[in-house]
Image: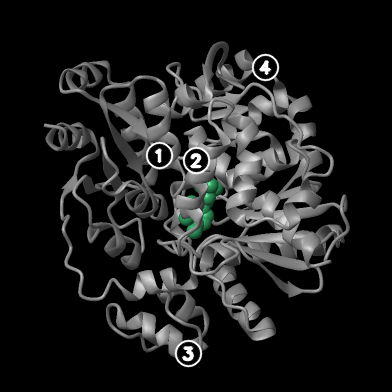
Amino acid sequence: MYYVSTRDAARRLTASQAIAQGLALDGGLMTPEVFLRLPSNALEVMKGMSYAQRAVYVMGPFLSEFSTAELNAFAQAAYGGGKFDCPEVAPVRQVDENTYCLELWHGPTCAFKDMALQMLPHLLTASLKKNGERKRVCILVATSGDTGKGALEGFKDVEQTKILVFYPQNGVSAIQELQMVTQEGGNVGVCAVKGNFDDAQTGVKRLFADEELREKLAKRRWFLSSANSINWGRVLPQIVYYVSAYCDLLAQGAIQNGQAVNVCVPTGNFGNILAAYYAKAIGVPIAKFICASNANNVLTDFLQTGVYDKNRPFYNTLSPSMDILVSSNLERLLLALTGDHAQVAGYMKELSETGRYQVSDKVLDKLRQEFAAGYCDDVQTKAQIAKTWQAHRYLIDPHTAVAFHVLEEYRRETGDQTPAIAVSTASPFKFCDGVLDALGVTERAQGLDILDQLAQVTGRNVPAPLAGLRGKEPRFTQCTEKERMVDQVLEMLR
Ligand SMILES: *Cc1c(COP(=O)(O)O)cnc(C)c1O
């Protein structure tokens, strides 16, 4: 299978080239030329499989240069061997009669980024080998909180690689920051950026586009690659859990084969919900994609009006991993809907020049057929956490609460009672402050004691990776101006 840039169909690469390169050289995103449908009995066949086996089954056709033996080894390394704290890896829990919650936070960093970032290093290092790449690779990451830690865990001490993570100063939770700055490993770097997530992300994109930097690093035998969800190696492993969730619902007898479900996804960069869209493209019966945003509701407006406009105030919310105004992966959806690379390139040009673009009525029609959208502010987020806890004794983090709120609103407004999978993207213990506040606890414990406090109030266990932060010393304390990020790269790759 070949991959093309969203902006130019003539830029064709193999899977391993696309993954090794990260971003297309024209600034577009590498995307499969076609989506092959799964065999008609695939969902029944996968019902009895482990998560790792399902991953091999789903990813295989997208990775034709990789042998099944290779993929089995990657999937075992990523999802086997006790890295996830439950055997299902991505369990589906029933919350009420027609609501199911797909929990994606049972991995080593307690957020859904692990689902892809435990797999990406295997795909990437193998891709480099297949392409005879002799240079070493440095992964640059801009993070709104969870990607950074997920990538650090995935790449720590992986041979021939280094990883450098930039996060917005004051833009991530205390626990997220502590998780990153205490990261172990001989090949890792972490640096705060003065600004918000978009500043960090724009800065990283600029580093990738910097020809002079690229030449300098090549002389030192380094090149740059990405672990952000613009890399196909991030999106592909995410398709797996939608397929897996559907298989689990079948296995539980919750639905009949072929029966449609809705999915509701708390969305930032549009990677997670895009993976759901691709799951449908290969044959999972999904009716509606419900896109849930926080107060940074640029996507809600876009999906309702067809106008994408990032010229608006930026809010730091209780769900910081969704505090994003430029959702990079939307570009891939635009290609899927238009099939027209030049049109996509045009929209993206407008976006970079004016911060705004408007899709045609035809594209808007298609969007509205399959997508619904809503948003949820911090007050509503807290109310939802409390409500879900009181009604179902089900504890959710603020990101997940955004999805629950938007799903309820969608059902109220449309009357659509299709069984829905709400996606849970982080452990509530990653966001103790917001969750305790929501539960009405006003006296807050200090520092990491807040983990035990939430455990006491709810009777749930602190996830081991978070409990393990106790007693770890920060290793990284740097903070850079966004214009000086290049210095950090040159310093790390001396
Ligand atoms: C990254 C993240 C999101 C947003 O996912 P996208 O793929 O960027 O849309 C939502 N919730 C949590 C907890 C995250 O870490």
Q: Label 3 to label 1, Cα distance in Å?
A: 36 Å
Mark nearer the N terminus (2 vs 1): 1
Residue 301 shows in this picture: no
Residue beneath disc 1: 227
Tell me where residue 356 sits by quadrant: top right
The type of residue carrying mark 4 is Asp
- Tell me: residue 423, above or below residue 298: below
What percent of the width, then of the height, locates residue 434? 45, 73
Judged by depth in the image, the label closer to the viewer, 4 or 2, is 2
Point out the image quarter for the N terminus. Answer: top right
Mark nearer the N terminus (3 vs 2): 2
Tell me where residue 485 sits by quadrant: top left
Left or right of 425 on screen, residue 143:
left
Residue beneath disc 4: 340
Residue beneath disc 2: 234
The type of residue carrying mark 1 is Ala
Q: Label 3 to label 4, Cα distance in Å?
A: 53 Å
Residue beneath disc 3: 457
What percent of the width, then of the height, locates residue 71? 53, 40
Q: Label 1 to label 4, Cα distance in Å?
A: 26 Å
